[in-house]
Image (cartoon, rainbow, N blue to C red):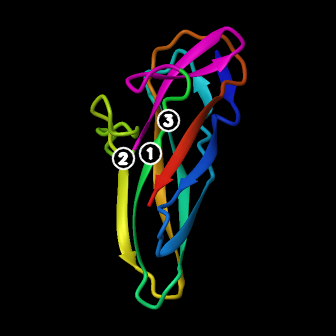
Amino acid sequence: MKLKLIGVFALLLCAAGSVHAEATCSLSSSGLSFGEYEVFSLHENYSVGNLSVSCTGLSETASVAYEIQLGRGSGTYGTRTLTSGGNVLAYNVYTQANHLFIWGDGSFGTAVLNDSYGLGLSTVSNNYPIYGRIPAGQNVSAGNYSDTLIMTINY
């Protein structure tokens, strides 16, 4: 049995800055789409999305340092869940391709993404991959499964 996963998760964006910020920053994301999940397959489903951060310097000597956190969505940091009605499919999101570090808010052993660089009066955009994985062997009904995660940038 195959089930089609469409719009695996949507990212809601929040930005936070200090009162005397040297820069303004914004986030955007392509999210993840895992495609079809084969219930009887022994193979996990993987997906890679993209997170883009754009920062603009507010002075000639401006620099920026930021931390990007990812909320739990449905489930817990240990096991996020995609839902379709009352059906649940476990998945998770990682900061690296080796899937060792769950992307979270720094609590419960989760990782956050950190970066810093000089800006001056320019605008700099950086892209970061979002790695997703659905474990094999989950006996779930066909449907469109989704989750919503909130990303927060602190700078």
Residue 48 on image: x %, y %: 51, 48
Q: Quadrant of the N terminus?
A: top right
Looking at the image, tell me whether mark 3 or mark 2 is earlier in sequence order: 3
Instruction: Label the magenta part by its dominant secondary structure.
Output: strand
Q: Amino acid at mark 2?
A: Val
Query: What segment is highlighted magenta in the picture?
Result: 75-94
Q: Secondary structure at mark 3?
A: loop
Going 63% across and 52% down the picture, which residue do you hit?
30
Please tell me how crowded label 1 is: few (under 14), some (14-19), or many (20+) other residues with Cα within 10 Å.
many
Which residue lies under the disc numbered 1?
Answer: 69
Q: Secondary structure at mark 1?
A: strand
User: Residue 71: which numbered mark, if any?
Assistant: 3
Q: Amino acid at mark 3?
A: Gly
Which residue lies under the disc numbered 2?
Answer: 112
| Relative to 96, residue 101 above or below | above
Indicate yes or no whether the magenta region holds residue 92. Answer: yes
Closest to the observer, 72 or 20: 20
Cα–Cα span, label 1 and label 3: 7 Å
Q: Amino acid at mark 1?
A: Gln
Furthest toward the bottom, the residue is: 60
Residue 135 on image: x %, y %: 44, 24
| Relative to 18, residue 97 above or below | above
Closest to the observer, 40 or 137: 137
Please tell me how crowded label 3 is: few (under 14), some (14-19), or many (20+) other residues with Cα within 10 Å.
some
| Relative to 7, residue 145 above or below | above
Q: CB of mark 2 within 8 Å of CB of mark 1?
A: yes
Closest to the observer, 68 or 78: 68
Q: CB of mark 1 within 8 Å of CB of mark 3?
A: yes
